[in-house]
Amino acid sequence: MNFELFAIDGQDIKIVERLLVKLQDMMTDGERIDYIAVQKKPAVTILPDSITISNKRIFLCEFTKLGLATDFEIFSWKDIKDIAFKEEIFGSKVTVIPFTGENLSIDYIPKVQARKLYQLIKGALENSKLNEIAPPPSQVAPTFEIQRPIEVEITNTYIEPVVEEVKEIALPPIAEIIIPKIEEEDDEMTLKLRKLKSLFDKQLITQAEYENKKNEILSQI
């Protein structure tokens, strides 16, 4: 690994090399180191504190017991609420704000490194939020567009007015509007003709007698 890539902003390359050796054993699949910020106090500090960020996590490192031990505070990006830094006379104070637990701060971070650290952490937090909101493609529920036939839409548009119109002009029951049949009485001539026809049908008179009598009755009109 090229350690000089992590010492372009004035980081102590020996501290960077020592950190990377320890961090390599802690990396997970697909994880990479993006930036290392190293504390620089006004007085000589043999074992300064540091902040390392990867594409998955943030590492706050403190060397203890004269370098024989190293204390790490490690957070994944989903556990970090925010990042803040304050520029002071000698460097900057960088504060990591987790969702649970106390805030963790490291002071005397060189201003250039603190600004770079702030930008990278803000970007990582934004990406983490976007990944939580957007589910993986395999989990996205398919959407279906239902198209209704044009005939159905037209029918639905006009059926209601037709029903209302039928209700308004509905006729009363047929029995109520039947006009009684008026029977007219037959006149005297009609009765004579019917009686004459009845006699002929019963063969009580001949055809000639029937015709003569019928002509006689009709001549009275």
Image (tube, grey):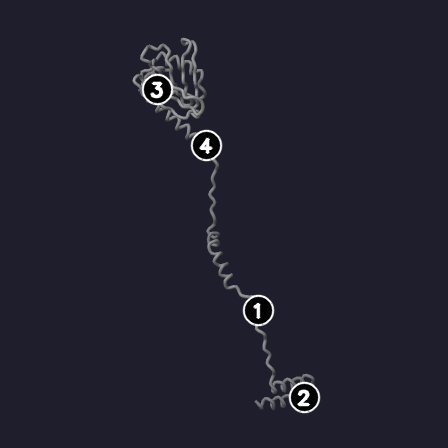
- The amino acid beneath tag 4 is Pro
Front-most of residues 208 and 162? 162
The residue carrying pointer 1 sits among few (fewer than 14), some (14 to 19) or many (20 or more) residues within 10 Å by Cα, namely: few
Q: Are marks 4 and 2 in contact (CB under 8 Å)?
A: no
- The amino acid beneath tag 2 is Thr
- The amino acid beneath tag 1 is Glu
- The amino acid beneath tag 3 is Lys
* Residue annotated with mark 3: 93
Considering only order in the chain, which callout, 2 or 4, is on the residue closer to the N terminus?
Answer: 4
Secondary structure at numbered mark 4: loop
Q: Residue 21, relative to residue 149: is it above or below?
A: above
Q: Residue 102, relative to residue 163: is it above or below?
A: above
Task: Determine the residue positioned at 50% across, 64% down.
Answer: 169
Task: Determine the residue positioned at 67% across, 88% down.
Answer: 206
Viewport quadrant of the C terminus: bottom right
For residue 74, what is the image quadrant?
Answer: top left
Give the foreground label among 1 and 4.
1
The residue carrying pointer 2 sits among few (fewer than 14), some (14 to 19) or many (20 or more) residues within 10 Å by Cα, namely: few
Considering only order in the chain, which callout, 3 or 1, is on the residue closer to the N terminus?
Answer: 3
Q: CA distance from mark 4 to mark 2?
A: 112 Å
